[in-house]
Amino acid sequence: EHRRADACIARAGALLDAAQAHDYEKATRDFDAKMRSALTVAQFQQAWESLAQFGTFTARGQSHPGSHEVYVVVTIPLVFEKANLYAQVSCGSDGRIAGFYVKPLQLPAQ
C-alpha cells in the first residue's frame, strides 16, 4: 500500500510539473483509458489554463496521500497569487491516474 501511495505521489507530481511547463501531452500520459476519454489533452489544457484567473502560480505544498475505496488519492495544495487551491489526483490499482481535479481550498472558519 505504501508503494502504491509513493507511485501515485510521483505521478501526481509529474502531472503538475508537465502542466506547469505547458506540456499537456506529457501531463495526461499516465491517465487510464476511462480518464483519457473523459478528459482529453485539449480539455485538460483548457482547464489548466483557466487557473490563470487566480493569478500567477507561486508554490506547491506537501503531497498528502490517502485512500478511497480501491484508489490512492493524493491531495496537493496549490498556491496562486489570488487564491489557494488544491489538486486531487486519484490512482487506480494499476497505478494509472483515474481522476484529477482542482478546487478552491476552504480553510476552516476561525
Image (tube, rainbow, N blue to C red):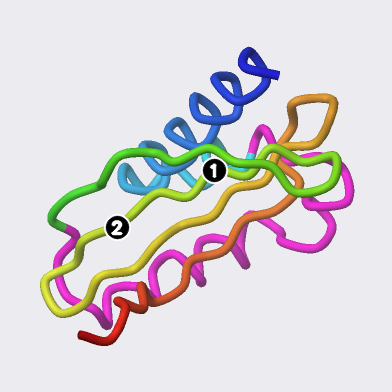
Identity, as a three-letter code, of the amino acid under mark 1: Val
Marks 1/2: CA distance? 13 Å
Please, is residue 94 above or below residue 86 in the view? above
> Is 30 left or right of 61, judged from the image as shown?
right
Q: Name the residue at 39% across, 39% down.
A: 63
> Is 93 left or right of 110, judged from the image as shown?
right
The residue where tag 2 is placed is 78
Marks 1 and 2: CB-CB under 8 Å?
Answer: no
Which quadrant of the structure image shows residue 55?
bottom left
In the rendered image, residue 44 lying in the magenta stretch gets the answer: yes
The residue where tag 1 is placed is 74
> Is 106 left or right of 43, judged from the image as shown?
left
From the top left corner, tell me how far across and down residue 15 is, in percent: 49, 39
Which quadrant of the structure image shows residue 53?
bottom left
Q: Nearer the viewer, mark 1 or mark 2?
A: 1
Q: Which residues are magenta?
A: 29-57
Q: Name the element at disc 2.
A: strand
Looking at the image, which is closer to me, 64 or 25?
A: 64
Which quadrant of the structure image shows residue 109?
bottom left
**Residue lying farthest to the top in this orientation:** 3
